[in-house]
Image: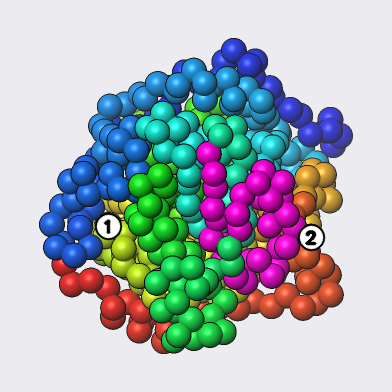
Amino acid sequence: MSLPHSKKIILEEKSIPQAWYNIQADLPTPLDPPLNPQTFQPIEPGDLSPIFPMELIKQEVTTERWIEIPEEVRELYKMWRPTPVYRATQLEKLLDTPAKIYYKYEGTSPAGSHKLNTSLPQAYYNQKAGITRLATETGAGQWGSALSLACKFFDLECTVYMVKVSCEQKPYRKSFMQVYEAEVIPSPSTRTAAGRHVLEENPQSTGSLGIAISEAVEDAASRPDTNYALGSVLNHVILHQTIIGLEAKAQLAQVDTYPDIVIGACGGGSNFAGIAFPFMPEMFQGKKTRFIAVEPDACPTLTKGTFAYDYGDTAKLTPITKMYTLGSSFMPPGIHAGGLRYHGESPLVSQLFHDGFIEAQAYGQKAIFEAALTFARTEGIVPAPESAHAIASAIAEAKKAKEAGEEKTILFCLSGHGLFDLGAYDSYFEGRLNDIPHSDEALAKSLEKLPKV
Ligand SMILES: *Cc1c(COP(=O)(O)O)cnc(C)c1O
């Protein structure tokens, strides 16, 4: 069998979607309302206005199906969008599978991942609202990079609280953010009460996304010129990311194809939802498409977590939302897929998973790096360790299709490149990279502390 080299399906620039898709219009079970962390009463839009601009608060709750993409944002999207969809012919050949494997590559953005899809509109709406500075957290550094760049474009200052272990693992991420003149602070820091509190209890703390979020939210809430920006989880972030799936759907339609299986790596859920949600309306109508969210077994939010109201951060400053969670005090091991080390999950993804529309899988990091290298050595692109979770699942599904002799069509999101993650690849080559499963005991302890709503 001889196949051409991996085929690229492009879309013309003029076919960048005009609107994002809001799945809240079509949810079989509407979301439970977010609650005020002090009173446990449903939050009012005004509760969020100290940290978010009104346009984003509206997007958080609207049930309108299509939300128009502002022209200024669409123009900036044109820098790198539409992103390509590739058919992974070389990988298919290696696996000798009857499955067709397609991937949507989001690593072509100047920030290197899908996160610029939401950092641009977030910076845009904040600037429109008169805000001059944004504070945020970053795990592996991808979100911090994307927001730093978006802030540069919209002339905003940017402060990034970066999880300490990631600062040490990925020093060039910090340099990258500084290129765009962001201020980068290792978290936990002494800059905020939340950070100081963590350091008093554990001066060696390597940090977590939950802690870094607390620091950024406290920073934003304490200054009128500053808002907070979150790179995943929230409904408005998921909304912006649907551009991935909308484009992919149009690209596959160009080759008369519709996926049987849609796969995404799942941290807070934004790239998974971004590629998956635009395919869900047909599934709600009865089409048998499978949707697989893939997470690390070190931080198994969907596969081992509980569906409950929980805090989004460690200091309990954020609204409590109903989601799959490992508990806001859960400290995930320092695995290399830093972007997937979050205790919670998008409420939208959580509800759909709870209702049985989404499947979840978990992998250890050795299996992830094996999948990453198999992919790089066939398709040529070095994937981010986060994205490699989707690859591992796509390979597993393609092998199953071979065993069953089924011609499945698989689509996955390659959410970013791994060129800032070569230190992690080095660890793998040197045999220093171990599977660090979560501790069931620590998980049980953390879940005991869920708010009693
Ligand atoms: C942040 C990130 C993820 C995980 O975040 P989601 O919100 O779940 O998408 C996955 N891949 C890459 C490349 C990332 O930067």
Query: What's the residue type where badge 1 is placed?
Result: Pro
Circle 2 Cα neighbour tier, 10 Å, few/some/many (<14 / 14–19 / ≥20)? some
Q: How many marks?
A: 2
Depicted 340 relative to depicted 254: above or below: below
Give the percent coordinates (x, y) of residue 162.
Answer: 57, 62
> Could you give the CA–CA distance between mark 1 and mark 2, rounded to whole angstroms?
36 Å
Q: Callout 1: helix, strand or loop?
A: loop
Location of mark 2 (residue): 422
Depicted 142 relative to depicted 16: above or below: below
Q: Which residues are magenta?
A: 156-184
Location of mark 1 (residue): 319
The residue at 46%/39% (across/down) is 132
Quadrant containing the N terminus is top right
The residue at 52%/21% (across/down) is 72
Give the percent coordinates (x, y) of residue 137.
Answer: 51, 57
Mark 1 vs ligand 1: CB below 8 Å? no
Picture colour scheme: rainbow
